[in-house]
Image (cartoon, helix red, strand yellow):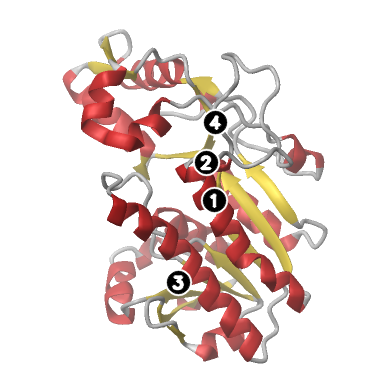
Amino acid sequence: METVLIAGGTGFIGKALTVLLLQQGYHVIILTRNKIEAVDNWELSKAQITGYKNLSFAEWNVKAQTIDMAAIREADYIVHLAGAGVSEKRWTKKRKKEIVDSRVESSRLLVKALKENANKVKAVVSASAIGWYGPDPVIPNQHPFVETDKVSNDYLGNTCLEWENSIDSVTEMNIRLVKLRTGIVLSGDGGALVEFKKPLRLGLATILGTGSQRVSWIHMDDLCRIYMFALQNDNMQGVYNAVASVPVSNKTLIETIAKKQRGRFFIPIYVPSFILKIVLGEMSIEVLKSATVSNEKIKNIGFQFIHPNIATTVS
């Protein structure tokens, strides 16, 4: 049985990925700041998780740069998902630094642990984001962003650049590295889709700005399958976009969700850009940004999406 060590395994994506890996027969070790608390959180759902006995926990402290070395020695693979949530709080100067530092410093701790300790790690699969790319030059954009496109010279672009650079040195240890630039993740268990649904309780479908901005999204099931695909595919290395095949406008996304939830009984409401700027501050730039991103590279190496279109995804 192979062991996958997950940094950030208690988060939104980490939990879903852990369940899939356990179902597929892997042993999973989750790195956490508080082992007792993490165990208690998972106890609530263990009855529903196949292979729960193969789940264990190890402690690390990114600020103190400490980590359970036994977990590093046991790992065959590392999945790096750690990082403060980009959309959870307003982007103050302090919060922006926390977003960057939580990613970069956690990468540095993993790299340091691998360099200084004997290990058998075959591959590291690290999260990144499509924030790497700038806005579409035109809408619709007939030339979606691809992995070789240059980084955007803005906050999220620079964050992704530092994030990806911070894990690159694992390749110097002959460890295969895969970086996944992930789009907006849709799941009924949390994240963006749940937030989009909230106004629908009042019958309101809230379209952001003009609604014309393209959203490059991915279903949680496909994202977790991509991580597992990256672990299992020895020929996969470098950067890949983790997005569905068909990006949609914000208007189409919101109205599709509304129709699934309410049939025809909803009222489209456009939230003006200036209101979003007041409420969200600098984060509103990303909410209103159109980014059409290609997934051709990962499809060309054999990955097959089970949720390529938005119409068959939301419920």
In this view, 288 is above or below 6: above
Q: Earlier in the sequence, mark 3 or mark 2?
A: 3
Q: Residue at x 56, y 14 (%)?
A: 139
Query: Mark 3: few, some, or many residues within 10 Å (few <14, many ≥20)?
Result: some
Q: Is residue 123 visible?
A: no
Where residue 300 appears, as percent x and y from the top left, is 81, 39
Is the residue 229 above or below the residue 66 in the image?
A: above
Query: Which residue position is annotated with label 4?
Result: 216
x and y percentages locating residue 83 in the rendered image: 42, 60
Q: Which amino acid does label 2 sit on?
A: Gly
Distance (Cα) linking label 1 and label 4: 16 Å
Q: Which of marks 3 and 2 is in front?
A: 2
Q: What residue type is labelled 4?
A: Ser
x then y, percent, for residue 225: 61, 50
Mark 1 — residue? 160
Q: Classify residue 234 as left or right of residue 153.
A: right
Query: Which dot, 4 or 3, sits closer to the camera?
Result: 4
Of residues 247 and 15, the one drawn nearer to the viewer in this rendering: 247
Considering the numbered disc 2 on the image, is that residue within a helix, a strand or a loop?
helix
Compare marks 1 and 3 and give the one earlier in the sequence: 3
User: Does the residue at mark 1 contact the one at mark 2 (Cβ under 8 Å)?
Assistant: yes
| Comparing labels 4 and 2, the label whose residue is closer to the camera | 2
Q: Mark 2 points at which residue?
A: 131
> What is the number of the mark on residue 139?
none
The numbered mark, 4 or 3, whose residue comes first in the sequence reads 3
Q: Give the alpha-carbon distance from disc 4 to disc 2, as whole Å.
A: 11 Å
